[in-house]
Amino acid sequence: MIDLTDNAVSAVKTALTRAAGTAAGLRIVVEAGGCAGFKYMMGLESAARDGDEVIEKDGVTVFIDERSQPLVNGMTIDFVTGLENSGFVFENPNAAEKCACGKSFG
């Protein structure tokens, strides 16, 4: 299971209200790549797929595919706003290492 901070929930809700079409939630996928071996991919999604874990938090639905589930189990997702950078931040207890950008882990 993953957790979203209040800031992350708010950011996802904003994205959903601005989305064209019928976005129902946020999909999180882990793919091979990035500086450290794996990278996080996120996007709006209209419905769950077979094998998805579906997480609901404060009116936000998150879809995680079956292959990514063990790689993100226990992860916390935050959304930060800064002068130079704004975006989602991943705190993943399964990551042995992560790159400086925070979007890739190994």
Image: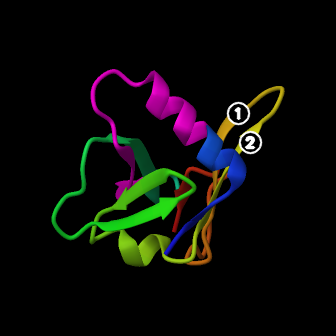
Name the side, left or right, on which 47 lies relative to 33: left
x then y, percent, for residue 77: 61, 57
**Residue 48 location in percent, x, y?**
24, 56
User: In this orientation, does residue 101 appear?
Assistant: no
- The spot of residue 53 in percent (x, y) is 33, 69
* Disc on the earlier residue, 1 or 2: 2
Instruction: Identify the amino acid type marked 1.
Output: Ser
First to last magenta residue range: 11-33
Characterize the local packing of mark 2: few (<14), some (14-19) or many (20 or more) Cα atoms within 10 angstroms.
few
Nearer to us in this view, 34 or 24: 24
Point out the residue furthest to the right here. Answer: 83
Query: Is residue 50 found left or right of 29 in the rendered image?
Result: left
* Residue that badge 2 annotates: 80
Residue 42 visible from this viewpoint: yes
Amino acid identity at mark 2: Val
Q: Quadrant of residue 92?
A: bottom right
Choose between 51 and 72: the one closer to the eye.
51
Element type at marker 1? strand
Image mark count: 2
**Disc 1 target residue:** 86
- Are circles 1 and 2 on residues that touch, CB within 8 Å? yes
